[in-house]
Image (spheres, rainbow, N blue to C red):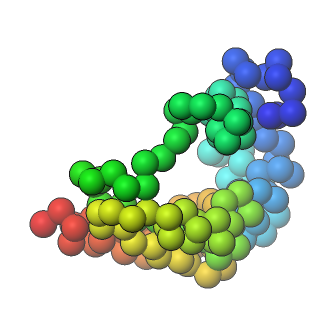
Amino acid sequence: MVGNPFNLHKGIGLTAKQFHYGFANALEEDAALEAWRTFHVPAPARALFQAALANFTPGAVTKVDYRKPDRAPLLFVAGGSDRTVPASVVRENYRRYKTGTVEITEYPGRSHFTVGEPGWEAVLDNTIGWVENKTA
């Protein structure tokens, strides 16, 4: 994917095996395959290249102002079994924010595909409740 610069302007897909490992690892293999068949679509590689090269690109579009004074409320949602963005990475991102309302919720045992796993309704309800509380 990112290793091939010719992919910059292409849509990049995952194999069913890659999807199961990286996104839906909390699901059994057959459930992950069904999720891949139902939900997987190739994504633009450009964003992956931008993120991968952000530390080497002055003024990168992916640069974050951690001290932005007028930040909207921000909730980080971490999956304890997420292999794509591990909970440790989400916690580190959360730790860097210095202004505004920034909170984190971690769901042990959930993968990156948390909205496709059993019990996703509770995650959604908690997130909606958080948003309603912060915007009331």
Q: Is residue 3 left or right of residue 38?
A: right
Q: Position of residue 42 (x, y in %)?
A: 69, 32
Name the quadrant of the C terminus. Answer: bottom left
Name the quadrant of the N terminus. Answer: top right
Q: Is residue 93 left or right of residue 42?
A: left
Residue drawn at (39%, 65%) of the image:
98
Q: Position of residue 110 (x, y in %)?
A: 63, 73
Determine which quarter of the picture holds residue 12.
Answer: top right
Count every numbered label the image shows and give the total: 0
Res. 77 visible in picture: no
Which residue lies most toward the left here? 136
Which of the pair 33/96 is nearer the observer?
96
Determine which quarter of the picture holds residue 32.
Answer: bottom right
Residue drawn at (68%, 53%) of the image:
35
Which residue lies most toward the front here? 58
Res. 36 visible in picture: yes
Which of the pair 107/88 is nearer the observer?
88
Q: Is residue 17 left or right of residue 10?
A: right
Vertical placement of residue 116 versus 50, above or below:
below
Which of the pair 67/102 is nearer the observer?
67
Residue drawn at (71%, 57%) of the image:
84
Determine which quarter of the picture holds residue 126.
Answer: bottom left
Q: Is residue 30 left or right of residue 88?
A: right
Q: Position of residue 11 (x, y in %)?
A: 70, 25
Residue drawn at (86%, 51%) of the image:
17
Q: Position of residue 122 (x, y in %)?
A: 43, 76
